[in-house]
Image: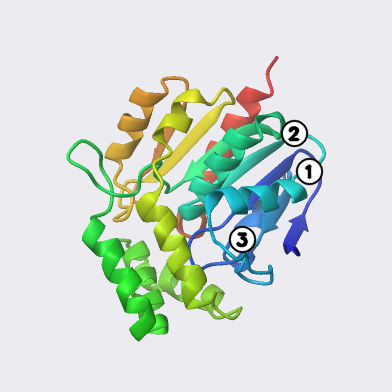
Amino acid sequence: MFIHTETYGAGEPVLLIHGWAMHTGIWRTFAKQLAQHYQVICVDLPGHGHSEKLPQFTLENISNQLQKILPVSLCTLVGWSLGGAVALDLATRFPERIKNLVVIGSNPCFVKTPTWAGMKQATLEKFTADLTADCRGTLLRFLSLQVKGLQDYKGVLKELKTALHDCEPPTVEILQGGLEVLQQQDLRPQLTKLHCPVQVILGSHDTLVPVAVGEQMLNLNPRLRVSIINRAGHVPFLSHQAELIAVLKEFMGTTNVV
């Protein structure tokens, strides 16, 4: 199947995987800045942007398709939100292809439990139910949640809306499949077994992925790194580009030290 990618810059390869309902366009400004230091490859998830649809939108099926477009040389995976779950799954299934893993605003278990920080099950279920009745309105409400509490929320929300409308949105079936992944997947066991360097990046004002997840992930895998970007929400690559690039450069520079 056809998987759409956009590539910027040259050097060590970095693959960017977007979140729910989005596409490569959400990364474009950030990717061009990051491409001053690395070769940056943005990928459309199956059924998103310009990529073909999968019959079943599952992590296993997604990873099996994305591994076909991984660079020949070892690469750093950067996954945002749902893309973080995809990146973690890819790194687990194809460890020989992955040098580093970076997850931004992501959670190995998105659903809140008595012992784990996350989103309320009822919130995700409501998004799933609302998609059929009002797909566009549901997507716009989700975008608003991503910038809630930000100082420049209007500017960031405008960028999100522009990116969303740059391509036809995924079908309701694909969107519901993505929400099912968020609701059903628990990748905490995989996180404990990863051997590649892992960087977790969270926003202090993220309303979808609580910063408490960082400490909980550290308890599962003490080898990983956690960075909190002050005053950032769910989309730090739009609101705090310089800070995010600095974290990535420091992390990747350290992993290059023999």
Q: Amino acid at mark 1?
A: Pro
Q: Residue furthest front?
A: 55
- Taking the image as shown, residue 75 lies to the left or right of residue 207, namely right
Quadrant occupied by the C terminus: top right
Which residue, given by chain and number where applicable, does mark 1 sit on?
71
Res 56 visible:
yes
* Residue at 33%, 74% in the rendered image: 141
Q: Secondary structure at mark 1?
A: loop
Closer mark to the observer between disc 2 and disc 3:
3
Q: Amino acid at mark 2?
A: Leu
Q: Is residue 252 above or below residue 243?
A: above
Q: Residue furthest left?
A: 114
CA gap, disc 2 and disc 3: 20 Å
- Residue closer to the observer: 62 or 73: 62
CA gap, disc 1 and disc 3: 16 Å
Q: Residues within 10 Å of mark 3 (few under 14, many from 20)?
A: many
Q: Which mark is residue 45?
A: 3
